[in-house]
Image (spheres, grey):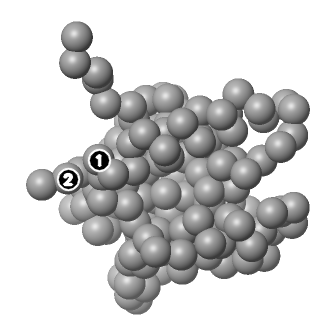
Amino acid sequence: MKEKVYLDSTIPSYYFDQRESLNAFAEITRRWWEEMTDDYELYLSDAVLQELNSGNYPRKNEIIELVSTIPLLPLIPDLEQVVEFYIANYVMPRSLVGDAVHLAYASYYDIQYLLTWNCNHLANANKRKHIRVINGRLGLSTPEIVTPLELFKEEDA
């Protein structure tokens, strides 16, 4: 059985990003996508699609096409309560509700990995313990929140 990966919007957007300052991240994203996506079950949420559709991306149509076959996790009312609990317990600031939504989906649906390039509010070692404590209070699992760099499979020697 394949492990599950929830993709936040940074992953498909970086796949096509052409800014020089993000070139290394974009290259790693493309390499991960080309080499690793078959090894995992990928998931998105409607929140990801909304972010991608509302963002100002030069290659928006290609980004949307890239994720068009990835299954969407259902939005259920419980997720809103999880997001509010995250905000009330300072897991994420209210101004970054999108990050809380991504974490809520991955946690609620027991996804093993939340894949992101957001290292300020998600893939941040200083936040992991806090997230685990809050998810424990909610009775939710806590995904490994990682960048594509951390989710390559080990090659056989």
Q: Amino acid at mark 2?
A: Lys
**Left or right of 96, for residue 35:** left
For the point 58% across and 40% down, the residue is: 29
Residue 43 position within the rendered picture, expressed as x and y whole percent measured from the top left: 40, 66
Q: Nearer the viewer, residue 17 or 106?
A: 17
- Which residue position is annotated with label 2? 2
Q: Answer few, some or many: residues within 10 Å of disc 2's Cα (few below 14, many 20 plus, some between 14 and 19).
A: few
**Viewer-proximal residue among 44 and 138:** 44
Q: The disc labelled 1 sits on which kind of residue? A: Asp
Q: Residue 128: which quarter of the image?
A: top left
Marks 1 and 2, Cα distance to the nearest angstrom?
7 Å
Find disc 1 in the rendering and name its residue.
39
123 vs 131, left or right, is right
On screen, residue 147 versus residue 9, left or right, reads left
Question: Is residue 23 positioned above or below 134 on the image?
Answer: above
Does residue 143 appear anywhere in the picture? no
Name which residue lies at 83% across and 43% down.
Answer: 18
User: SS for tag 2?
Assistant: loop
Q: Nearer the viewer, residue 18 or 106?
A: 18
Q: Are marks 1 and 2 in contact (CB under 8 Å)?
A: yes
Secondary structure under the numbered disc 1 in the rendered image: helix
